Structure formats: C-alpha cells, structure tokens
C-alpha cells in the first residue's frame, strides 16, 4: 500500500471536519485508521499554529505634554493643583478650601 502525502491527509482532515462526523464514524466510512486521522489532524493544527504570526506586542507611544487641556492653580498656601480644562468648579473650590484650611 502506498503512503499518503501530507496534502492528501490535509484534504482528508478538511473533509472530516466539514462532514460533522465523529472521528470513528468518518474513518469507518472512508476506510481509514481513526488514530492516523487524529494524528494528522493534530499535526496539521500544530504546523498551522507554528506558522501563525507571532503574538501582538505593545509599542510605547510618546506621551502628550501634561499642559495640553490642563489648568494649573497655585493656592496662597503654595499648593499646586492641576485640573483638566473641563473641571468641576464646585469640586475644585472644595479642594482649595480644604488645602487652605490645612495650611
């Protein structure tokens, strides 16, 4: 009996997966050894995983200057508070009152 090529096994495994049959049912229908079918399925999956692109990695981006969209308030006590341009005025007022009270 002539040995099957990798390409032939790839086609068989693809047909098996598309069939929706279990390994034993497909093997019986096609006259294959179920262990050989499962081996080739595993081997082809392994090769595909190894050939897949490498995992994604993070790339450091330059940070924006802190001053962009920020306001800086220096209290009489010397405390410096930086807030975004769309700050909550009431919250800032309470914070400044607290800082001044502790100074």
Image (cartoon, rainbow, N blue to C red):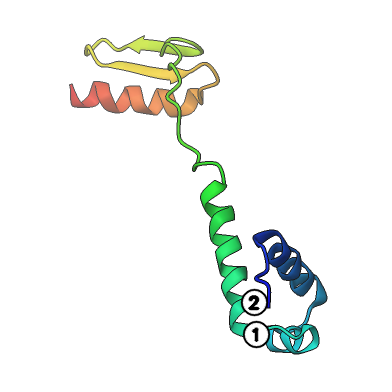
* Residue 79 found in image quarter: top left
Q: Which residue is mark 1?
A: 33
Mark 2 to mark 1 CA distance (whole Å): 6 Å
Local SS, label 1: loop
Q: Which residue is mark 2?
A: 37
**Quarter of the image containing the N terminus?**
bottom right
Badge 2 crowding class, 10 Å Cα cut-off, few under 14, some 14 to 19, many 20 or more, is many
Q: Is residue 35 above or below residue 84?
A: below
Q: Is residue 67 above or below residue 25?
A: above
Q: Is residue 70 left or right of residue 79?
A: right
* Residue 43 found in image quarter: bottom right
**Quarter of the image containing the C terminus?**
top left
Q: Are marks 2 and 1 in contact (CB under 8 Å)?
A: yes
Q: Which mark is residue 21?
A: none
Q: Residue at x 69, y 67 (%)?
A: 9
Residue 37 coordinates in the image, percent (x, y): 64, 77
Q: Is residue 90 left or right of residue 7?
A: left
Residue 2 coordinates in the image, percent (x, y): 68, 72
Badge 1 crowding class, 10 Å Cα cut-off, few under 14, some 14 to 19, many 20 or more, is some
Residue 52 coordinates in the image, percent (x, y): 57, 46
Q: Is residue 100 left or right of residue 54?
A: left
In this view, the residue in front, 25 or 83, is 25
Q: Residue at x 38, y 17 (%)?
A: 82
In this view, the residue in front, 94 or 30, is 30
């Amino acid at each position: 009996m002539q040995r099957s090529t990798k390409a032939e096994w790839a086609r068989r495994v693809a047909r098996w997966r598309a069939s929706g049959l279990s390994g034993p049912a497909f093997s019986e229908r096609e006259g294959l050894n179920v262990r050989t079918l499962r081996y080739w399925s595993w081997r082809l999956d392994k090769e595909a995983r190894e050939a897949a692109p490498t995992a994604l990695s993070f790339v450091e981006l330059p940070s924006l200057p802190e001053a962009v969209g920020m306001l800086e308030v220096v209290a009489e006590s010397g405390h410096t508070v930086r807030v975004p341009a769309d700050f909550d005025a009431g919250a800032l007022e309470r914070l400044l009152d607290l800082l001044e009270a502790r100074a």
